[in-house]
Amino acid sequence: MWTANRNRHARARSFQGWRSGIRRVLPWIPGEVITVLADLKARGFQAFLVGGALRDLLLARPPGDWDVATDALPGQVEEVFPDRLVLHTGKRFGTVRVLAGEIPVDVTTFRQEGAYTDGRRPDWVEFKESVVDDLSRRDFTVNAMALDPLAEKLVDPFRGRRDLRRRLIRTVGDPQARFREDALRMLRFYRFQAVLDFRGEAETERVIAQIAAEEPSLLANVSPERIRDELNKLLTGVAPGKGLRGLVWSGLLPIIAPEFTPVVKTPGLMEHLIATVEAIKPEAHLRWAAFLHDLGKPATRIEDDRGVHYFGHEQAGERLAGALLERLRFSRAFQEQVLTLVRRHMFPCDPGMTDTALRRLAAKVGRDALFDLLELRRADIVASGNHCHRAWRILSEFASRIRALLREEKVLTLNDLAVNGHDVMAVLGLAPGPEVGRVLQELFYWVTEDPERNTRERLLQYLEEKREEKSE
Ligand code: ATP
Ligand code: MG
């Protein structure tokens, strides 16, 4: 009797929670977005807030982008917002971007879609009248809800709210079929676990492991850019370890990044990389550097009577990391940022280092990368666990020396030189080209020996002398 009563109370509470839950999110929807929904409804169309924004609102997380789903066709949406349209690159797929004040809102016609045979876009899309049809094409239950804030109505046919409460990622419909339509969803499954700190449904995990083992070619189809974007989100999430362990456990990781094949076979190494990722700040380039920093270890491992060594693993790692980042179509600038960190992560971190050596290190990696490098070393130490205290003390001493040098403006990079490439070209009569860079480097080395030399006058004089030497 008592138990039954308690259950009834629990049910009543959760029902209340359900209604007040919706009311609770309403004030957090920007007025501009509400206006878009209201304008569509005023013309007799249905209009719902859908996708990640709704999920994030229900989790009390700040939403990223705003998506609206409607039964209005793209042309009709354009008629409703004639003067607020942005671009309509997605129009063929039913998406029209509307500017709501400053906020871009993607308004998409209810649709169903076919498989992603080319790995980029669905083969076909078909517009539908019902929001439930639209929700059923979506990947996971927590992403497959729709809210009409004006009617205070939540459409949740796949029990996404329950999964939000259980903190569970579960596919809409049969995982086999959904991953076959679009294999990227297997990565998204782990991405959302990392970003939301949720767990994945066990049966789904098993399906992914089976696909990875028996049909790895399904993923070969998916475009590298889409894989890259998911990995970025996974790595910068609050629980990257969850996502990464899942990728390893399921066997997906070596398929999307064969560079990791020897890593997962080396005892302890993958765990070390994951721990480093978890210990480092959540910025994409840092997380990638942490993830990749020891990629070269398996290939360089040697064992002799003094122990195990990995001589040159940072160079070997840089090569492997470079190949991976290039294949995933990362920008040159991003690749360079990450590869510098991988290449230099074994920098001598020793309180006995001279100021000149410190300045030269700063010169090699650049002022910004210097602190990134310290951050990587800090995370590496935390992740290694052993000798932690001593190493930590050395590192923090080292960091304060660098900060002191920076305060005195003694740590210099090429950009801090009191002259620039134009001066070099003018004095030496050079055309733009690699020679200019070499001269700047030379000036720089000269200055790192004594920062007092970094005045325009003294550097121009140095260049004059160089010109005279050359003409002799
Ligand atoms: P984020 O906050 O990272 O943008 P999100 O949930 O908005 O997360 P998006 O990739 O922007 O994720 O996708 C928006 C919505 O579109 C998702 O919530 C989901 O409903 C749907 N969706 C996106 N990609 C797929 C896919 N590959 N298969 C099925 N549905 C998808
Ligand atoms: Mg989004």
Image (cartoon, helix red, strand yellow):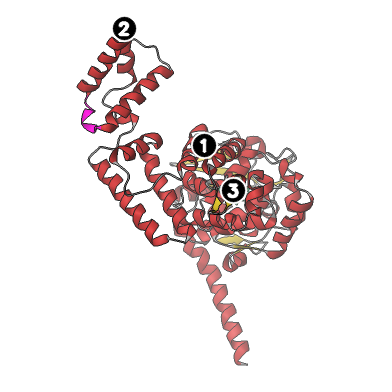
The amino acid type, in three-letter code, at marker 3 is Arg
Q: Label 3: state its secondary structure.
A: loop
Q: Can residue 150 be seen in this view?
A: no
The residue tagged 1 is 335
Q: What residue type is labelled 2?
A: Ser
Q: What's under tag 1, amino acid-wise?
A: Gln
Task: Name the one closer to the observer, 101 or 449.
Answer: 449
Label 2 Cα neighbours within 10 Å, binned few <14 / some 14-19 / many ≥20: few
Q: CA separation, marks 2 and 1? A: 41 Å
Q: Which mark is residue 471?
A: 2
Q: Where is residue 387 in the image (x, y as percent from the top left)?
A: 43, 60
Q: Is residue 12 left or right of residue 349?
A: right
Occupied quadrant, residue 140: bottom right
Task: Report x, y in % for residue 32.
Answer: 46, 47
Quadrant for residue 243, please give it: bottom right
Residue 301: image tag: 3
Residue pictured at 71% horizontal, 52% vertical: 133
Rendered image: mark on residue 24: none
- Outermost bottom residue: 1
Give coordinates of residue 337: x percent, y percent. Answer: 47, 38
Decide: is 44 above or below 331. below
Q: Is mark 2 on a helix, strand or loop?
A: helix
Whether residue 61 is situated above or below residue 300 in the rendered picture: below
Q: Which mark lies nearer to you, 3 or 1?
A: 3
Note whether 240 is above or below 39 in the view shown.
Answer: below
Task: Say which residue appears at 65% left-offset and 55% top-offset.
Answer: 248
Front residue of 158/39: it is: 158
Q: Quadrant of the N terminus?
A: bottom right
